[in-house]
Amino acid sequence: MTPTGNRAEIRVRSDLAGGVLPAVVAMLAARAEFPLDRLDEALLLTDAVAAHAPARSRDGHVTVALAVDGDGLRITVDELAAGGAVGLVADATLPAVGAVIERVADDVRYGTDGDAGERLVLRLAYAAPERLTVDNGR
């Protein structure tokens, strides 16, 4: 894991993804004062990635970059096998709920990561809270 500001890059064995990814997302979201309703949705997205990325990985590892800024959370899943990005989203479909990732994420993008494989980028938007200061009277 490489933290930079409110970012982290993680490459973890597939069997550890379910424990590591949600913890890192929760940490980054807490630092950014993520609203609780959006935190629940961020954890849903992370759980879906952790559950389905291992089967779509090129090498048995899950590679994810997480970034929280003033606009929201960005989850970038890299090093997916051919068809892995679309397949991961399709795998996260539940009966009676539908496509979980597409319903929860505000933006879903597919791409390539050069020679490293396919990439899936998920964006969950939120408005950053106003910082309390002496000047704003709170």
Image (spheres, helix red, strand yellow):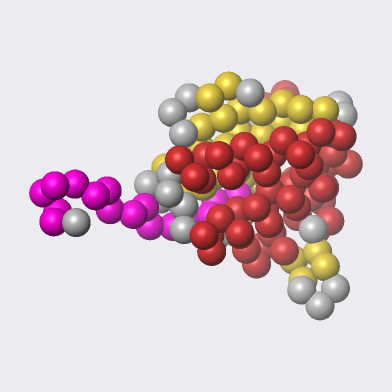
Q: Measured along the vertical axis of the image, is residue 58 above or below residue 22?
A: above
Residue 29 shows up from this direction: yes
Q: Residue at x 58, y 21 (%)?
A: 2
- In the image, 15: left or right of 7? right
The answer to which of 134 and 107 lies nearer the viewer is 134
In the rendered image, residue 98, in percent from the top left (x then y), is placed at: 77, 71
Q: Which of the 4 quarters of the picture holds residue 106?
A: bottom right
In the rendered image, residue 135, in percent from the top left (x then y), is placed at: 11, 49
The answer to which of 134 and 69 lies nearer the viewer is 134
In the rendered image, residue 63, in percent from the top left (x then y), is placed at: 71, 31
Q: Which quadrant of the rendered structure holds the N terminus?
A: top right
Q: Which of the 4 quarters of the picture holds residue 80?
A: top right
- In the image, 101: left or right of 80? left
Q: Measured along the vertical axis of the image, is residue 41 above or below residue 61?
A: below
Which segment is the magenta one? 122-137
In the rendered image, residue 69, in percent from the top left (x then y), is placed at: 42, 42
Q: Residue at x 61, y 59 (%)?
A: 40
Q: Residue at x 68, y 48 (%)?
A: 46
Q: Is residue 102 magenta?
A: no
Q: Residue at x 46, y 52 (%)?
A: 34
- In the image, 77: left or right of 37? right
